[in-house]
Amino acid sequence: MAPNIHELVSRLAEPASRASEAVNIAAEVGAEALLILLHDEAIGALTPAPGFPQTLPGGPTWRAFLKDQHSLGAMETELPFPSSDELKLARVFVERDTVFMLIGGDPSFDVREFVDAPLLAALLRAEAEQLRSIGLVSAAREASARATNLAASLDAAKAEVRRKADELALTLSRSDHLNEQLKRLNETLEQRVSDEIRERLQAEDALRQAQKMEAVGQLTGGVAHDFNNLLTVIMGGLDSIKREIDKESDIDVRRLRRMQALAFQAADRAATLTSRLLAFARRQPLAPKPINLNKLVSGVSDLLQRTLGETVAFETVMAAGLWLAHADPTELESALMNLAINARDAMPNGGKLTIETANVSLDENYVSRLVEPVPAGQYAMLAVSDTGEGMDKETVDRVFEPFFTTKKAGKGTGLGLSQVYGFVRQSGGFVSVTSEVGQGTTIDLCLPYTDEVAVAAPVTQAPTATGDGRVLVVDDDINVREVSVAMLGALGYSTVEAGDAVEALGVLAAREDIDVVFSDVIMPGEINGLDLARHVRENYPGVAVVLASGYTAQQHGDKGAPSDVELLHKPYSRAALAAALARARTGANGSL
């Protein structure tokens, strides 16, 4: 027969025997356990009353139950008991801040009868207050909090370890063992993060390489297409010239001259194409100087207006107090012309082109967001805006790629904007594009500011077309060397040949009649053209130096050519060679 509520209260009133009596009562009423919990305001959760087991099975279900604010009265719920892996039905009665529980079994005692046990609840609260006053409750609270935190960490650790290994035990009872497992887990996590980062970096490298190869393929295809067209003209012209010469009689001179002109035109176009490719690659030779952008725009305004035609209105907005830009004025004029032509083509039905200048100051936060960051500081800006068709985002993202064009076949090479981009980046500036379909496009060229004073170029006398003296021709390519010797002979110079810089140094040491060293820049061996030029200017000050190259990137850490060395860019004409020799000899000797 189940005890009545008054007998039950009497048996639980004695603290010393309360634990054993709770076990006996639970068995007598058909339950597995009798628990009484008190609400602890200090931690905001339920805790076992004095005399009852202070350690509960734990787990997220128990933690949620202990922290919930339960409504008064009777309720039923499922809780893990006696371990965290087995759920049992718990019959619960809440009276103010006291919770009476019968867990498991099929008890014959109605938990609601605890409503008649207010004295037991009061007694338990009093005992709890007494224990708290002597510090035992504080210690229990700290232990409970630690156990709760450790249990939460254990749950996370068990979930992670189950995915990696099935060998970890279900329950960790000792804190030292738990800490060791958590330490191992953290070490594993760090290794996984490290592996993930490494794999991601490898994937990004692979993507960049694929994009690079795609760009190289596109560039190679464009170059091959254009150069094949040019070579077709050159080779066809030379073949026609050969056939006329082979006749030995009835030679069609007009046809020969026409084929010669076509070959020269194709060669000039090839040189222009090479120059644009070098501009995109930021390897073109530049002669930067202080530029007043307002004056530069004013100087080309008439030409721009004629280029745009009558259907395009042209306006300039010049900033007062504009800073000087540091760039090559010739290349900047070419870039401006490229932008104007692209803007005109984007306005087939007419529109308006605006060129604006301004001073801009960029901070570290802004430049760090650029695709290719530039130093923070002051820049002079040249903006070209049109009211044309505009571009979508995909087109804007590709607009500076070489050979990319939205124009119809035969209307453009796709190198104009890539040349502009390469020139501005090589000058230390940056380009930004703002465009919207149907609203037009604005391209900003931001060039580095300089506090140097712009000086007008001195007027120089045109060099003579012929000369005299002895020229040491240095080039590892025998065909180029042969052509150079022929040009120099036609100009009236005598020549001595060397196949590399080492051989040239031997010639200089053995002869005293060398007036000019005419050398290629990039040659095999440890000594290149720049090294040779420095050696000649340091040890043979009376010998002028002219360097010729189709590619001006520094090799093997070169410091560049001396300032008194003349640079001639391949391909060059006989007139350009004569002018370079004259300037070099003037610089070396003060006179021809």
Image (cartoon, helix red, strand yellow):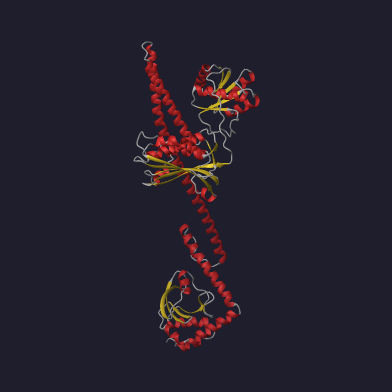
Q: Is residue 292 visible?
A: yes
Q: Observer-nearest residue: 218 or 570?
A: 570
Q: Quick one: quadrant of the N terminus?
A: bottom left
Q: Residue furthest bottom?
A: 6
Q: Residue at x 40, y 27 (%)?
A: 230
Up-down: is 310 above or below 588? below
Up-down: is 158 above or below 391? below
- Residue 370: image location, x then y, percent: 49, 47
- Residue 32: image location, x then y, percent: 45, 78
The image quadrant that residue 305 belongs to is: top left
- Residue 81: image location, x then y, percent: 46, 73
Q: Observer-nearest residue: 196 or 53?
A: 196
Q: Observer-nearest residue: 113 or 536?
A: 536
Q: Residue furthest right?
A: 539
Q: Residue furthest top?
A: 249
Q: Quick one: quadrant of the C terminus?
A: top right
Up-down: is 582 above or below 50? above
- Residue 260: image location, x then y, percent: 41, 20
